[in-house]
Amino acid sequence: MATKALSSLPSVDRLLSCELATPLIEQFGRATVKTAFRRILDDARRAENQDVPDEATILALAGDLLAAESAPSLRPVYNLTGTVLHTNLGRASLPQGAIDRVAAVAAEPSNLEYDLTSGQRGDRDAHIERLLCEITGAEAATIVNNNAAAVLLVLNTFAEGREVIVSRGELVEIGGSFRIPEIMTRAGARLREVGATNRTHARDFADAVGPDTGLIMKVHTSNYEIRGFTHSPTETELAGIAAGARVPLVNDLGSGTLVDLTRFGLPPEPTVQAALTAGADIVTFSGDKLLGGPQAGMIVGKRALIERVKSNPMKRALRVDKMTLAAMFEVLKLYRDPASLPAHLPTLRWLSRPVEAIEQVARELLPALESALATHASVDIEPCHGQIGSGALPLEVLPGYALVLTPNQGTDSQLQDIAAALRTLPRPVIGRINDGKLYLDVRTIETPADFVANLESLKLT
Ligand SMILES: *Cc1c(COP(=O)(O)O)cnc(C)c1O
């Protein structure tokens, strides 16, 4: 930077006519480049006694500014938090087949709501309904934007202006402000809590049923567990009470898996099929939790009930787009052959990854990480425990391995600096800070060479 008087600052017009401005204008457009020049000139005027930038400096600053601002804000990161289905980090990662189908329908017109046989208007749910019914054993199915929307829509369809009977022990709050009592109010339904926090009996439900009852609801207490002196009625008991009252039994499974997870060495989680067999008339669950698909809310159950859900005008406001349908079809198809799921579905592959394989990745990455952190931190390999995330099995832990970074000065500020530097990498690295150390749980790293290449850009001061 040259030291000059403010009066020596070039004008915006002069900067725009510079030869070096031409490529910027071609890439970003004249108006955007002009705004960038204005901002840099304004900054220079405001910073009165500082060095006044010359033309070449302003052009370079504008190039940096424009490049930074045109970089996508939403981009891939390394999720090394140990929580595989991390809501803040995008939950499930899609299989390649699904990504390809998304690209195909995004690029061209599609038969989204068009029946190719009759040439008439079609139903967008039809693209996944048959497959979803085949896998779950349900009579009918529909899909909305997420499971919160699914719950809202079901409550509104069957219980607007009426009561919904729920156990006191199941009034959950899912992270990010989804609370069963609040969603119920928004759906226009009245909450009728029964039982006590730890114990609810079938007779509590039976006693609460009346002419105002809209539905009976069971909610998977995803992210917490009540242990000790507890009781809840069986699903079969609830189904009997609901049938007697001629109202639907709705089971919000939350994560809702379509396979028995124990076959992959994971703890058991209620399946959608089991919930239907146990007597639920409607089951709702997420598309991007254990299912491993795109963000969506699935509603499956009795045909007559699903028809009513579909004809609720709110369905129109909560419907999914063609990209979600394209991805969901490919993900659901994988469930026809459960044995090969880990080979194709990243979420299940990471969750069921053998601990030796994770340790191997940690060993492979150790030298590169040690040299990148040089004098700033020491790196050790330690066994650790990850979790599934998104409310599934909150107390179950996934044995794995982490690279553990200990700052050499032992201060929190140095630790924060290292964590921040890792977040500024081309593909940001997100770990978990605990007890003065940064844990990088490597469960989700499948190509160590890419991780090492990314690490080469690390800048620590
Ligand atoms: C996660 C969850 C929801 C909300 O699902 P989203 O797909 O995140 O909208 C609702 N109910 C339960 C029990 C859940 O676990």
Image (cartoon, grey):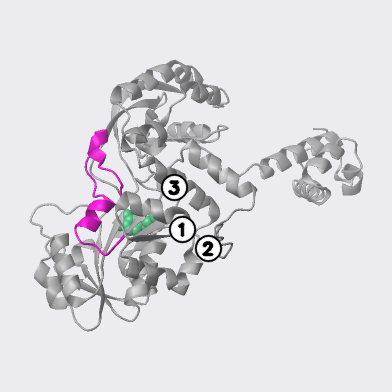
Near mark 2 (Cα within 10 A), the count class, few <14, some 14-19 or many ≥20, is: some
Amino acid type indicated by mark 1: Ala
Q: CA distance from mark 3 to mark 1?
A: 31 Å
Q: Which residue is label 2 attached to?
A: 122
Q: Tell me residue 346's x, y (percent).
A: 41, 36
Near mark 1 (Cα within 10 A), the count class, few <14, some 14-19 or many ≥20, is: some
Amino acid type indicated by mark 2: Gly
Q: Which residues are magenta?
A: 255-283
Mark 1 falls on what kind of element?
A: helix
Q: Does residue 108 appear in the picture of this structure?
A: yes
Mark 3 falls on what kind of element?
A: helix
Q: Residue at x 30, y 39 (%)?
A: 387
Ligand 1, image quadrant it occupies: bottom left
Q: Where's the N terminus, which quadrant?
A: top right
Q: Residue at x 23, y 50 (%)?
A: 270
Of 318 and 90, nearer the camera is 318
Residue positioned most to the front:
118
Mark 2 falls on what kind of element?
A: loop
In the displayed structure, would residue 354 be above or below residue 334? above
